[in-house]
Structures are given as structure tokens and as C-alpha cells.
Image (tube, helix red, strand yellow):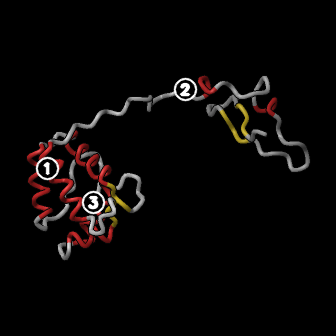
Amino acid sequence: MWPWRRSASALPWRLVLPDLVGDSPTDDDVFPGGSPPPRSQSHPRIMGAKGSKEALPELSATLNEKLTTMFQRMDKDSSGNVDRTEAIAFWGKNFAKVNANAMFNEVDVDKNGEVTLAEWLEFWQNVLKHKYTPEEIEEEVDSMLEGGSWVDWNDGRST
């Protein structure tokens, strides 16, 4: 049972509500010929083709080591995940909640409330992709390791 009908108006489909007394529309009412058109005709693929995701640049060994060190310092229980409580504890009294929330808004892409090491490193690869140098990133990571604040990177994500 399909509640949609082809229409001659500018919109190609319109909702057809079943008659409260009569029968509901049939496939013949909705689709000429009795069945929906093949997906390739009705919903052509516009974007998102397989393999269209741009590759992320590799992290240098030095940068990877610093980023892993920072992640491990945040991951107090060594679970392999950093939750908000651990991130807040990492920043201590230096606008801890603000820094933790800003970090999670950018890094926690699946929004499950935890950042994995893979998400963490992928975030920094994304930063590199947006024309930051490894030296600039290392400088900011060193600053955060010494108690500095989270930086809102111009990387297509927002805090």
C-alpha cells in the first residue's frame, strides 16, 4: 500500500490519504503499471559515490607520538576512550568544561560521548588536511600538555 501518487503539478509526488469509507489506493493508483520505477530512474545517485572520500594525510612519527601522549594523559582509566569527565580532569581549573566541550564538539564524530584514539588521530589528520603544518599542531599540543586551552582549528568542524 503506497500513500503517494504521481502528480502533474510541479511536485512529482503527492500524499494520497485513504478514503475512510472506501478502499486504500492500490499500486495501480499510485504507479502507472502497478509497480514503482526502478531505483536508478527514480532516485539517481547524485553524490557520495564509493571511494569519493578524500584521503587524509599521514601524521609524522613525532606528531603521532605527541598526540598519543596527550590522549593517554586524558585517558586516566586507560580504557582506550576519553569521556567528558576525563577531559575535564585533564584541563583542571583552566576553563575545564569549556575546553572539554569544545574538544568533544570537534573530535567526537559519532557523538557517543567518548573519544577513541582512532577518532583523536583522525581529527588531527583532518587538521593537517586543512593546511596546518605539523609544527603548528605540535606547538599547540605542547601548549595543551602544559595546561593551555583547546584551539578551534579552521578545519571544517566547529566547537
Q: Earlier in the sequence, mark 3 or mark 1?
A: 3
**Residue that mark 1 sits on:** 137
**Residue that mark 2 sits on:** 44
Is 47 left, or right, of 153 in this rendering? Answer: right
Q: Classify the position of the C terminus by image quarter.
A: bottom left
The kind of residue tagged 2 is Pro
Q: Classify the position of the N terminus by image quarter.
A: top right
Q: Earlier in the sequence, mark 2 or mark 3?
A: 2
**Residue that mark 3 sits on:** 103
Q: Residue 81, how many percent across, how many down?
A: 33, 60
Q: Residue 47, how many percent across, how many down?
A: 45, 30
Name above or below for residue 76 compared with residue 41.
Answer: below
The kind of residue tagged 1 is Ile
Within 10 Å of disc 1 (Cα), the crowding (few <14, some 14-19, many 20+) is some
**Helix, strand or loop under label 2:** loop
Quarter of the image where one finds residue 143: bottom left
Q: Earlier in the sequence, mark 1 or mark 2?
A: 2
Q: Residue at x 27, y 61 (%)?
A: 102
What's the CA distance linking mark 1 and mark 2? Answer: 41 Å
What's the CA distance linking mark 3 and mark 1? Answer: 15 Å
**Helix, strand or loop under label 3:** helix
From the viewer's side, name the closer residue of 22 and 125: 125
Is 113 left, or right, of 71 in this rendering? Answer: right
Name above or below for residue 12 compared with residue 63.
Answer: above
Quarter of the image where one finds residue 147: bottom left
**Helix, strand or loop under label 1:** helix
Q: Residue 151, how many percent across, how many down?
A: 18, 57
User: Looking at the rendered structure, which numbered label has been put on residue 19?
Assistant: none
From the viewer's side, name the closer residue of 105 and 57: 57
From the viewer's side, name the closer residue of 24 and 106: 106
